Amino acid sequence: MFGRKRSDPAKRDRVGTFFFRIFGPATVEGAIQGWSPEAQSQYKKMREAHKQAAAARRESAVEDR
């Protein structure tokens, strides 16, 4: 429309492949894999804390009425 040409998809793929080879996949240091027993126990503790916090908020909302 404005005289700009779209870049060639094959060229974009080559550039992406180049950067992937240099930097690799996205990673996080110290991350816990979701299927490990440690991660599952942490998730259960976190979920329980969220449930308790939600219950406390509901109780305080009822008392404020």
Image (cartoon, rainbow, N blue to C red):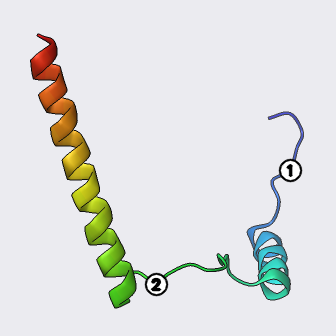
The quadrant of the rendering that contains the C terminus is top left
In which image quadrant can residue 25 be found?
A: bottom right
Q: Residue at the spot x=35%, y=73% of the render? A: 42
Q: Is residue 3 above or below residue 62?
A: below
Residue at image mark 1 = 5
Between 38 and 21, the residue placed more toward the observer is 38
For the residue marked with disc 1, what is the amino acid? Lys
Image depth: mark 1 or mark 2 in front: 2
**Direction from residue 33 to residue 27 in the image, left or right:** right
Between 18 and 3, the residue placed more toward the observer is 18
Q: Residue at the spot x=22%, y=32% of the render? A: 57
Q: Residue at the spot x=11%, y=18% of the render? A: 63
- The picture places residue 17, in percent across and down from the top left corner, at 78, 82
Q: Is residue 48 above or below residue 38?
A: above
For the residue marked with disc 2, what is the amino acid? Gln
- The picture places residue 28, in percent across and down from the top left corner, at 65, 75
**Which residue extends farthest top?**
65
- The picture places residue 51, in percent across and down from the top left corner, at 20, 51
Q: Is residue 35 visible?
A: no
Q: Which element is circle 2 on?
A: loop
The quadrant of the rendering that contains the N terminus is top right
Residue 53 is labelled as none
Callout 1 touching callout 2 (CB < 8 Å) = no
Q: Is residue 45 visible?
A: yes
Crowd band around label 1 with a 10 angstrom C-alpha radius: few (<14), some (14–19), many (20+): few
User: How far apart in space, not on screen, are marks 1 and 2 (Cα)?
Assistant: 43 Å
Q: Which element is circle 1 on?
A: loop
Mark 1 and mark 2 lie on one chain; the one further toward the N terminus is 1
**Which residue extends farthest right?**
3
Residue at image mark 2 = 33
